[in-house]
Image (cartoon, rainbow, N blue to C red):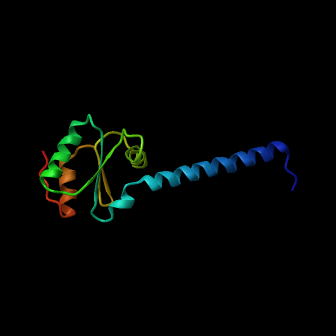
Amino acid sequence: MNLSPYKLLAVTGVVLLAGLVWNKKREIERADPRRQTGDSGVVLLVAEWCGYCKQLKSALDTAKVPYTELDVEDGGAGYDAYNALGGRGVPITVIGQDVIHGYDPGQLGKKLSQHGYPVQLN
């Protein structure tokens, strides 16, 4: 098989690009907080300035729901988890393998109670 230098360069470029895309996908998968929540763990992705985040954390604290808090603006694990979940705002709540974007008291209350955490949200 005789490839011209241009075809060889194009094939090499495609292979390198595919490798970069595959590696980025693996990084995103590693950062997904659902890998640590199991069936009923709770992770909150929040920002310091977010009023709904504070309201949700307060309700979970009052109900004594154990959760892990990740700050999406820290440039570390919170930021990576936010991107892995396709973040488009805060809060993002991971309950078991379910992801809830935004503050939706009905959906949050339903999912939390399904996982054994009765919480009153307003």
**Residue 90 rendering spot, x and y as whole percentages:** 30, 41
Quadrant in the picture for residue 110: bottom left
**Residue 8 rendering spot, x and y as whole percentages:** 80, 47
Q: Is the residue 53 above or below the residue 65 in the image?
A: above
**Residue 55 rendering spot, x and y as whole percentages:** 17, 42
Q: Is residue 85 left or right of residue 3?
A: left
Quadrant in the picture for residue 103: top left
Q: Is residue 36 left or right of residue 54?
A: right
Which one is in front, 116 or 30?
30
Q: Which image quadrant: the C terminus?
A: top left
Q: Is residue 100 left or right of residue 55?
A: right
State the residue lying farthest toward the right.
2
Q: Is the residue 115 above or below the residue 21 in the image?
A: below
**Residue 46 rendering spot, x and y as whole percentages:** 29, 43
Q: Which image quadrant: the N terminus?
A: bottom right
Which residue is painted at 43% across and 46% down in the image? 80
Which residue is painted at 22% across and 57% down in the image? 66
